[in-house]
Image (tube, helix red, strand yellow):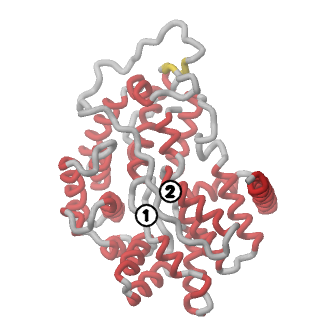
Amino acid sequence: MTPTLRRVWWVMGAATLALMLWFIWSGRVHDEPEPPAAAEAVPAASPPDAPVHAPPESTDLPVAAVHGSDEIELCGGQWVKAKPDGSIDDEDFARVVRLPEARARVIDDLRADTSEFARAASIQLTLVGSDPASPAVAEERDSLARMAATTGDPQVYALAFNTCGRVQPTEGACQLLNPEQWARLDPGNATPWLFALAQAAQRRDAAAQSEASFRISTSMLSDQHFFAVPGLVIDHMPSDDASMPAALMLASEVIGVEAAWSLPGYQALYDLCKASTLRDANRRQTCTAVAELLVEHSDTLLERGVGIAIGKRLGWPDERIERLRGEQTAYFFSPGASTAQAPVDGCNGIRRDLATVIRHARLGEAGALREWVAQSGKEAADFILAEREAQAKAAAAASAASAAR
């Protein structure tokens, strides 16, 4: 697997992973941890300049009769040389799988689609690897924001709103978008209200914070639509083996772009549910509903981790906290969830990772975890035991490090 795929594939990239792990594990050390500072996402690999919007002369690559021990076979009989550490150079991978041509074909295919969301996704795909401050990117971003301003599709609005998240809200067409309109298009979804809560907290608007927190607590689900575009990209790629490596890398590039999205107001939510505020019965009821929502009905492991952290503050039984954490840790290291910890294994790894992206697009990341838990054959006691063993190892390591200092 290439360094880029390993770097951007798991969940939402480095920023989200760091936040997720902080929320999951912070409760072990402190009863009242401080909210994490936002981390910088690891950028996706930059694509070659100016992709050619035309099919390649041939999709068949010459294959040598004999391959060296330092070469790895990708899907469809394609071979690429590995570096001494076993990784694959991004440029070599892109050249072998004809990534620029594949990207251009997918963009053209999405632009020609009758679906508004597909056309919106084509704009996002053109932003991969581009300088966010460049005039061309600003023009594409404005085009997406203008599309969202008149759309009835909540996925289009979510895509535009999040793409605008890294610019000032008064810049260009992005100022046309707001979380309240997203909420009107996506009733029952807590995600836009999480953004509304963060904005209200910044304004110190207590009434708006109360409204947003109530809306979150009464929502049916929290859906960021994070894997919708990667899933759509895969749908628009050919399904033959030779196309699978490029399909996975294109999906991973989109995940890298989305890792740079602004995140909802978790800090504001965490402040809302501080231990000092939970003595109020109404606030406690709201925070209980929010924690249950994020644990049971969110679409990302990050939000599930936030729900677990709030649940710990609420005094959920230790067995439930340990089971939830144990499930998440076990899923994180399972072969079907990530290759970040696995050795390169050519087409088998590509096929497995592609299936995981598709599964996350279909079920959401947290939904895929729940499916994995149900199919794992493990009991709650197994996850609890694994979590306790992990805690014991962490405590022993911390003690040894302290003694060494």
Instruction: Confirm or deny contact between disc 2 and disc 1 (CB under 8 A).
Output: yes
Residue 280 picture location, percent across and down: 59, 93
Q: Is residue 87 left or right of residue 308?
A: left
Comparing 216 with 186, the one in front is 216
Residue 257 picture location, percent across and down: 38, 49
Number of the label disc, if any, that sits on residue 263: 1
Residue in the image at 29% along x and 44% along y: 130
> In which quadrant of the rendered view does residue 95 lie?
top left
Is residue 338 depicted above or below 258 in this figure? above
Marks 2/1: CA–CA distance: 9 Å
Most distant residue in the front direction: 405
Task: Say whether residue 382 is visible.
Answer: no
Q: Residues within 10 Å of mark 1 (few under 14, many from 20)?
A: some
Comparing 104 with 235, the one in front is 104
Q: Is residue 84 left or right of residue 199?
A: right
What type is the residue that disc 1 sits on? Leu
